[in-house]
Amino acid sequence: MNMMRTRLVVLNVLVVTLLAALAVRLWQVQVVRGREFVSAAAETRTRGVIVPPVRGQILDASGQPLVRNRTALVVSVDRTALTRMKDGGHEVLAKLGVVLSKPVKQLEKRIRSCGPGVTRPCWPGSPYQPIPIDDRVTTREALQILERQEEFPGVTAEVQAVREYPHGTSGAQMVGYLQPVTQEELEKRDGLKAGFSGVDLVGRDGLESVYDEALRGKPGLRRVQVDRLGKPIGVEQQVAPISGDTLITSIDSRVQNVVEKAINGAMKKAPKADGAAGVVLDARTGRVVALASAPGYDPTIWTGGISEREYQTLLSDKAGKPLVSRAIKGQFAPGSTFKVSSVAAMLRSGYPLNGTYGCPGSFMVGDRPFNNFRGIGLGTLTLHTALVRSCDTIFYKSSYEQWLKDGGLHPKQPPKERFSNMARSFGFGRPTGIDLPGESAGRIPDRTWKKDMWAATSADNCRRARTGYPEVSSSSRAAFLKRLAYENCVEGYLQRPGDAANFSIGQGDVLVTPLQLARAYAALVSDGKLRSPRLAWATVRPDGTLVKKIDVPVVGKLPISEKERLYIKNALSQVASDGTAAGAFAGFPMDKVRVGGKTGTAEVWGKEDTSWFASFAPTANPRFVVVVMVSQGGMGGSTAAPAVREIYEGIYGFKGPAALPDGRPAAKLPLIARDGTVAR
């Protein structure tokens, strides 16, 4: 009995002790730390969601969209959430594959991180960002995911804006494309991490890249109340996102389509052509009216991810590297289109503007003969006629004479280098500064360049001078290469007389881009001012409010007088009617729109010639400068010039509806109404 009582006493003491401890704990929780736990409980019921803004459109000069948005249901996967599951999320992906009718292996590839040894498809963005795996989801598929969220943890289906390209391949390299934000960008780019929504894309090329900040807009914030399972039960606070600005360009989509068609047609007519470019500038302002490169590609290939095969095709030589814009990145010998710079160099060297010059079929430069086209002599000519008929030997002689005056192989210090310095004054040898990324500088090969090139290549040339080229099957070709390697090993740092002669007619080591040539001609035939071309004209808010007008900067001036410019321009004004492009323009209505320009046929070792035609119209008061280049296109008058003719016919409507009925580029920004539509 005593033992029983003892046990009851002990039990009562334990119960009282536990109740006392519980009371103390309740007092601590409810009184001492009550506010802390209330605050914590409230926080767990609220989720902050960053709302991505709608990206701004890119419009042409008339307000027509070059790039716009379409609304799409997008399914995304949070890879971090999947990796925390016991099976790595395999079961969730298997169920998702059934709903979307996609193989599990494909989904697994789409969500893995890109990196060394990982081929596309893969995810190039931040590993903490939801990964879009399908942007063509039906409402029924989305509802299956949303209504059974417990079966699809880490999977979302929501409405997002997706980029759309109404003109297809036209101008693809110019407008650029979007890709996911990388972790490195989140860490380095100011303001990007703070407003990162998890589904953001950034511009990777073209206008999308250069004007990314303005187009992207500012994200909003939505604070959502959720239950203990994380399901939304209400919105506590909402700050609306600010849509990105609309970018208005000087591009005319009608002219752009005309140029695209012309250069693609020119490539088809030249059996070995492997690329082409077309540029149309407003001769007076320096704004870009059209900028085309062929072959092109469909920019929607980037939407929703790109496969390894597709990506490699964009960069492959066999496909013609369609990702690369030949208009601004392609570097080619300009041929006789370069003679406008050489004539200016002659004038600055003291050759008389109204003098006469012999144009023999051949001229000895040092101990080597340099020939006219097909070795045909043209008699005694003025500089005017030399440009119209494209005499080479006049330029060989003058450049050789200036090379000798500079000291030849033993140059005076400093050499005047009239021809190369004049070329730089025309904007060659440096980027134009156009508002596009990755522009090439071209090349002006003067004496300094020769020394730098020799320093970089002499070791290899000297080795080849000893070993030769055993891998080359042609014995004559191998012997030539070995002899050339020996010459470059011993005296490759010297500018030889042949280098100077070739330079004067746009051959040898000189390289330019189609845009550089167009800019030089625009300065020559307008006011003599060298401008940095611009595609963007203005940014406006979606309701049409002007944010910023983008001006075209003047970056230089041609070092020749107005009289000299007009002389050269007048000579070029006869090329399409009486000169080397007369065949291409036979029957063209010169009485309505007179076209001037210069053909170019640049030789390329082991390939067909590069075909050029640089032009302007109307000649009396030019509004347009049009340049076409066709790589391996043959003669300038046979391939590029007919393409330029087709462009003018399209602009002015000589063979169908006119792209520009009034024959002028747009002079005023299009009016955007408050609802975002173009006011007519």
Image (cartoon, grey):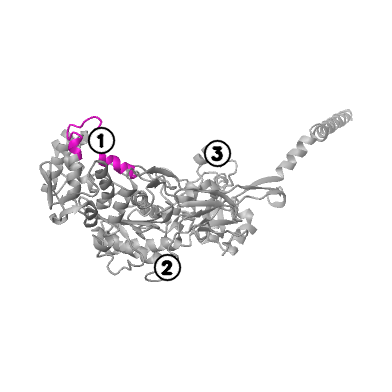
Secondary structure of the residue carrying numbered label 3:
loop
Q: CA distance from mark 3 to mark 1?
A: 47 Å
Q: What's the amino acid at mark 2?
A: Ala
Q: CA distance from mark 2 to mark 3?
A: 46 Å
Quarter of the picture containing the N terminus is: top right
Frontmost of labels 2 and 1 is 1
Label 3 belongs to which residue?
A: 190
Report x, y in % for residue 63. Answer: 52, 60
Quarter of the picture containing the C terminus is: bottom right
Report x, y in % for residue 501. Answer: 19, 44
Give me the residue at 38% from left, 66% from top.
650
Frontmost of labels 2 and 3 is 2
Frontmost of labels 3 and 1 is 1
Q: Is residue 283 left or right of residue 334?
A: right
**Does residue 408 show up magenta in the picture?**
yes
- Looking at the image, which is closer to me, 599 or 466? 599
Label 1 belongs to which residue?
A: 416
Label 2 belongs to which residue?
A: 658
Q: What's the amino acid at mark 3?
A: Asp
| Residue 271 versus residue 121 in the image, above or below | below
Q: CA distance from mark 2 to mark 1?
A: 48 Å
**Sequence-first tag of 2 and 1:** 1
Report x, y in % for residue 398. Answer: 19, 44
Rate crowding at label 3 as few (under 14), some (14 to 19) or many (20 or more) other CA atoms within 10 Å: few
Q: Is residue 479 left or right of residue 212?
A: left
Specify the segment rendered in magenta: 402-427
